[in-house]
Image (spheres, helix red, strand yellow):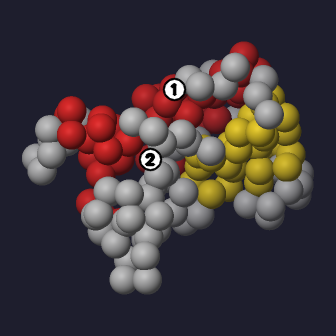
Amino acid sequence: MINDRILFCDFDHNGECLTCDCWPDSCGYLRYMNQDYKWETREQLQEMFKNEKMAKLGLINYEGDCLKAIKEDGEILIQDQYGAIVERFDVPQFYGFIDGLINVVDSKGKSWNYPSESRDAKPSYSMIYHFVKDIK
């Protein structure tokens, strides 16, 4: 299944990624983030993605993104599964949400506490860092 966790991929009409030349189930970026170097070396994967910047990141995913982070003008917008922007964070506030100090309430009134959600439904901390690192 193709979802926003496959961050830099741009799939063609045959389903192959135009960035890493992989099928969705063997995404080069996810292999890089998981330090899986069975097909390419670490350096080859770094070269492949050196100019890519993450514009969005699925934060909580239960058969689709319940909450998604989107970069916009130095802020991080939180979009819910209904497409509504439910929060605007600067970087410290975003990490407050990740650490559980701030809850996000979606457009239907559900309160989300990030640390309380299943580990399998969330991206790794290295993916979160990669998403945030270029925000000024």
Q: Is residue 27 left or right of residue 136?
A: left
For mark 2, give the secondary structure. helix
| Residue located 38% across and 65% down the image | 18
Residue bearing the label numbered 2 = 120
Comes first in the chain, label 2 or label 1: 2
Count every numbered label the image shows and give the total: 2
Q: Is residue 36 left or right of residue 82?
A: left
Q: Is residue 24 left or right of residue 102?
A: left
Residue bearing the label numbered 1 = 129
For mark 1, give the secondary structure. helix
Which percent across, then down, holds residue 56?
62, 46
Q: Which mark is residue 53?
A: none
Q: Nearer the viewer, residue 75 or 121?
A: 75
Q: Nearer the viewer, residue 58 or 75?
A: 75
Asked if labels 1 and 2 touch by Cβ distance under 8 angstroms, the answer is no
| Residue located 80% across and 34% down the image | 73
